[in-house]
Amino acid sequence: IFIACGWRGEELDRELVELSDFRKVRGLHTQAELARHGIEVDVSGDPAYVLPDLLTKAQPNGLAFVMRHIKDPSEYNEFTAHEYGADEIYSAVVETIDDTIRIVHKISGARFVLTGSMHVAMTAHAYGVPFALLDGPYIDCLPKWYDWFSSVDLGEPVFVNSIVEGRQWYNDNVRNRNNNGI
């Protein structure tokens, strides 16, 4: 059983699809791929949008920070926060539920989040925190990004290199678009 799942852009195995039960999907691209297999399913968006119902938004921390994807091969000391126009650079590594809550609070209290992690970006968006997608040597599964953007009516994903570029993209594509798409 799949609930709020997202398609990775790869050919689906028809036999496995027939053995599965799809209740809801992340975005329009997943919905379209399943429709090619004769399965009609509603788009629910990503489960990250439930977070504000589970964890109260943190008090503002005033930070504009960078958090790359957990699999990004770049060393965290390779770039400084200053080069991104950010206050801090954080790791997305979590080992405990407390780590997860700490990161969600850091994201929900930020003034801006520049990230290469789709779920960090989703979390920021879910809490109404300005965000942008970090360009770099590692972009995990681009079709998932397109699927997510389709589910919240943000057009196509654009990856940027700094907080300044990210704020411009956010102001042009999110802030001025249907109240954050959620």
Image: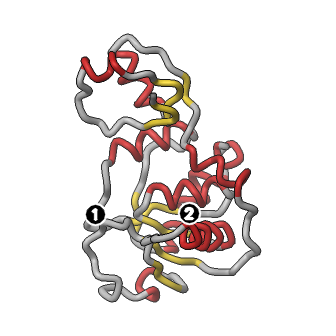
Which label is found at residue 116?
none
Q: Nearer the viewer, mark 1 or mark 2?
A: 1
Q: Is residue 40 left or right of residue 97?
A: left
Q: Amino acid at mark 1?
A: Tyr
Residue at 38% x, 22% y is: 20
Percent coordinates x, y for residue 18 in the rendering = 33, 16
Q: Give the residue at mark 1.
A: 138
Residue at 34% x, 19% y is: 19
In this view, the residue in front, 55 or 178, is: 55
Q: Give the residue at mark 2.
A: 131
User: How dense is the environment of label 1, judged by Cα within 10 Å: few (below 14), some, or many (20 and up)?
Assistant: some
Q: CA distance from mark 1 to mark 2?
A: 18 Å
Residue at 23% x, 29% y is: 11
User: How dense is the environment of label 2, judged by Cα within 10 Å: few (below 14), some, or many (20 and up)?
Assistant: many
Residue at 49% x, 82% y is: 85
Q: Split into 4 quadrants, where in the image is the N terminus? A: top left
Please tell me which of labels 1 and 2 falls first in the chain.
2
Residue 110 to residue 34: above or below:
below
Q: Quadrant of residue 125?
A: bottom right
Percent coordinates x, y for residue 80 in the rendering = 40, 88
Q: Amino acid at mark 2?
A: Phe
Q: Split into 4 quadrants, where in the image is the C terminus? A: top right
Disc 2 secondary structure class: strand
Q: Quadrant of residue 172?
A: bottom right
Discs 1, 2 touching: Cβ within 8 Å: no
Residue 11 to residue 15: above or below:
below
Residue 61 to residue 28: above or below:
below
Percent coordinates x, y for residue 139 in the rendering = 31, 58
